Amino acid sequence: MPDRQPTSIGAPAEWAPTAVVRPANARLCSPSIVRADPTPSAQAVPAGETPSPWARRQVLLLNATYEPLAALPLRRAVVLVICGKAEVVHDDPQGLAVHSVNASQSVPSVIRLSRFVRVPYRGRVPLTRAALMLRDRYRCAYCRGRAETVDHVVPRSRGGSHSWENCVASCARCNHRKADRLLRELGWRLLTIPRAPSGPYWRLLAGGETDPLWLPYLGEPAA
C-alpha cells in the first residue's frame, strides 16, 4: 500500500457514511449527502451501535493505465466515482448499493481513475506474516511441507534481524527442531533464498485481506 494517499483525489476526512438531511439544492457529490447501506433497503446504523463489518470494506484503486495504486476505504471510493474522478470496473458481487435522496450508486470492488496520476517512489514492502506466507507460497523453507509459522534463519538470540532476507515460512516441526541453532550446526540448507518482494501487488497484500476480484489487476507476484 502506498506510504500516503494522494490528497487530490480523496474524500474529506470528516465524512462518514450516515444518513443526513440535506438542502434541496445540495450538490450530489458532496460527501455529506451519501449514505452507504449494507443492503439496498437497510436503515442507517443508530448512534452508539457498532457498524456492520461491510463499513470496513476496501476497494482497489487503479491508475488510468490499470496499474494498481492502493486499497481505499469504501466511502472514499464511492465519492471518487460520484464526483466523476473514477469509474467502476467491477461492482460488488452481492449487489450492494449506496444511496442519496435522489440517486443510487452500486458498491464497487475495483475502480479506475479517469486521469493518470504519477506515483512517487515507494520504499520497501512492510514485512507482515500474511505477505511472507504468500511470498513462500505457504511452503516450509526447509522441507517444503505446509508452512504454519515464521522462522528467523539466523535466530534473534544469535543476532539475526527481523527482515525479509532473514525470515522464512516454516512448518511447526522444522521450527521446533531448529530452535535457536544455525543452519550449519544442523547441516540444513535453505531450499530457496529469501528476498524482499517488490511491486504494488505486495504492498497491497502486506495490508491484509485481498478481494479475489482484485487478482487479475494485481499481476503475478514476484519476490
Image: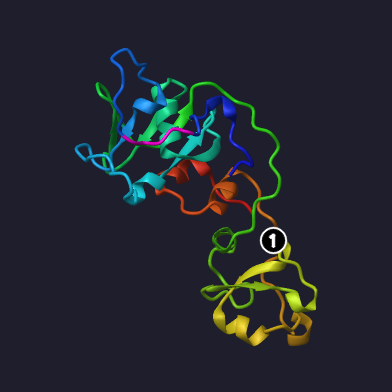
Count of marks overlaid on the render: 1
> In the visual, does 3 lie left or right of 10?
right
Which span of residues is magenta-colored? 14-18
Q: Quadrant of residue 41?
A: top left
Q: Residue at x 41, y 27 (%)?
A: 31
- Residue at far left of view: 41
The stretch drawn in magenta includes residue 208: no
Q: Where does the C terminus fall, quadrant-wise?
A: bottom right
104 in relation to 109, above or below:
above
Question: In this view of the protein, which residue sits in the foreground, 108 or 20?
Answer: 20
What percent of the width, then of the height, locates residue 187?
74, 85
Q: Quadrant of residue 190?
A: bottom right
The answer to whether residue 116 of the structure is visible from this angle is yes
The residue tagged 1 is 164
**On screen, 172 above or below 16?**
below
- Res. 64 visible in picture: no
Which residue is pictured at 28% across the width and 39% down the height? 37
Up/down of 146 relative to 94, above or below:
below
> Could you tell me residue 1's position as x and y percent?
58, 44
Magenta span: chief secondary structure:
loop
